[in-house]
Image: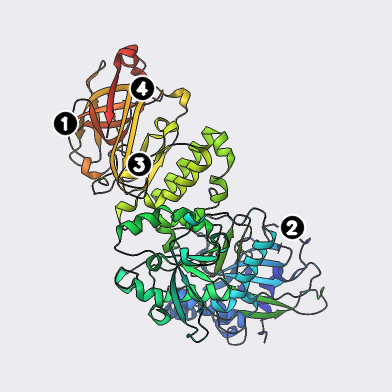
Amino acid sequence: MPGPVCRFCQRLLPGSIQSPGPPGKMSNRQIANPGDVEHYPNFRAFINSSKNCTLCKLILDHLIIRTGQEYVDERVAECPEGCAVKYLLCLQSPHVRNRIQFTMCIFGIVSHTPPERECKTHPFLQLSILRMVTENYKQVHIPYWSALEPFSTEDNLSLVSNWVTECDHSHEKCPVPSHSQSEMPARLIQVKPTDPNSSPNTLQLVQVSSLSTPSQEIKYAALSHCWGDPTSLLQTTSQNLQDHMQEIPFSTLPQSFQDAVTVTRKLGIPYLWIDSLCIIQGDAQDWEVEAAKMGSLYQNAYLTIAATKASGSTEGLFIHYTPTLQLEVSTPDNSLGKSIHLYVRPWVWFELTPERSPLLRRAWVFQEMMLSRRTIHFTEEQIYWSCGTCRASENGTWDAQTSVFDTFNSQHILSQSLKQDHSQLMRAWCSIAVGYSRGALTFTKDKFPALAGIIQKLQDATGEVPLAGYWKSSILSTLDWRVRRPLAEPKNPGIPSWSWASVNAEIELGAVLNQNLQAELLDCNVEWSGAPHSSSITNATLTIRAVLIPATLSTGTDNKRDTRIRFGIGPNPYTGFHSTNFPDTDWELGDGEVACLFLSERKYVCIVLQETGRVKDEYRRVGHGRAHSEWVAFAGAEEIWGEDRRRVFTIV
């Protein structure tokens, strides 16, 4: 039943109860400036009102959650004029998707101070206030808003089913992929028993090659999740493989797996792929074969189920919501002729970012999200949908927003435009590499396997040759990377020092236009122990002809990262540079002889190299530097940039 609303609360919500604007037009407009509308003149009156007004009670409950009961008691104890509850801000978006009208309100406490000082505002609650209308101003039913009893995201899977159906039948940008048997995973989990006498909760691991259904018609969902504690994670090993081929008891699955099975069954999808169950753990050969297919696996999945909120497999997908507060209010001038219903819930953040989502901090997931045709995210707040055509959410507020993965999704990286425009490929790859570098890996050996699917798709689309995190045609243009913050750990073994993938840190990577290059790539070689990018690198070298200037490192005593590089050339031997972006890792700090590689006409930027001591003219990268202005002014001298200064050398 709708709750009563006091006269002050009715005054607070004018934007929510006015007649909506023209259907189909999105807008955000401020209808009340901060502090414009007073709620209650003092805190004691507000407390008394909360006994009868449902909205006042909601505000008070959240104030206690945010600040504690002691804070509330202190406000009540103050003089009647000491504090006021004020309506600070209201943003209105009429008719999102021609159906509903949204309003956000922020409530806060305004502490009155002496006249010479300004009032201080302490916001404590953001509300989403909805008036559900259609184009004909008729009431509509949206479960997220209409539920007046506690409910779970599991109760709202019919909404997911509607999204899937709409995507299947209406989205031209989300075509069914064509795939061969070789691109399919070796194993899938059959979520519905074939034997009618079996328990409905019986699961079974099946070999895809043994299925009678053509690979093109096999429909499966893929789970994207954080493992968490491996000891609590059910895994398929060579010891229990045959047991899992017979039966996987539902009760043995961790909560996230159980919930994924529930979603898969309710959507009518016959198979589910989960990495720990469908790849034989501990079997290096099986892992290498399946890892090489990871990109195709997610791209060919009918749907990707993302346990976005969970940091481990035991946390599950579903969340439980508190009931919606339904308010019955009237317009101040009775222009509608009757009271209307408003639906109030705490404001929901709708950004899918690594900071708010444990799953999105994983490096593996960057590829999974980018290549998935469509993904359903289960977050702390609600369910989100993302596909190649649109985005959606349970409460309807994410429909017009952009996702962290929208810029370079599978449709984009398969675009012919990348093949036709070399510079576009460079820009796309720089963005991909930077985004990927932000993700965390449990095992450093996964640095390339976790990116192999994207690399393969780009290679197929463009015909370019990949080289340990670069592309052969543009490697010199993108070799000038730097770490945002050096880590106190050595570089990844087995990855060439010149590759940004050699560090486990967020990088910055830009592209130098080819016409500005002052270096020449003479030879490049990357060899793998098995399948490229899903096995280990056995040898990787770059042979370059460019200006290479000898210099000396001098590390500061107070701050080891305050490292200067002194050139032994020019009018002033002290002329050089120091940069907080140097070195690549803290392990490479220290004094010593180095050489500075200048790739382009930008003479103030260089790559810092050290000789390996194994063979003549062989170097490894140790950092990145930026020159002082006096060096830039001098660096145009012909004695430095002349042809006689160019050398041939190798970087490993």
* Mark nearer the N terminus (1 vs 2): 2
Q: Would residue 314 be visible to someone looking at this image?
A: no
Residue wearing tag 2 = 25
Distance (Cα) linking label 3 and label 1: 23 Å
Q: What secondary structure is found at the residue carrying circle 1?
A: loop
Amino acid identity at mark 2: Lys
Q: Are marks 3 and 2 in contact (CB under 8 Å)?
A: no
* Mark nearer the N terminus (4 vs 1): 1
Q: What secondary structure is found at the residue carrying circle 3?
A: helix
Q: Are marks 3 and 4 in contact (CB under 8 Å)?
A: no
Distance (Cα) linking label 3 and label 2: 46 Å
> Is 158 placed left or right of 614 in the picture?
right
* Mark nearer the N terminus (3 vs 2): 2
Q: Nearer the viewer, mark 3 or mark 2?
A: 3
Distance (Cα) linking label 2 and label 4: 54 Å
- Picture coordinates of residue 545 (x, y %)? 33, 22
Residue sitting at x 29%, y 29%: 577
Q: Residues within 10 Å of mark 4 (few under 14, many from 20)?
A: some
Q: Are marks 3 and 1 in contact (CB under 8 Å)?
A: no
Amino acid identity at mark 3: Trp
Q: Residues within 10 Å of mark 2 (few under 14, many from 20)?
A: few
Residue wearing tag 4 = 632
Q: Which mark is residue 613?
A: 1
Nearer the observer, 59 or 114: 59
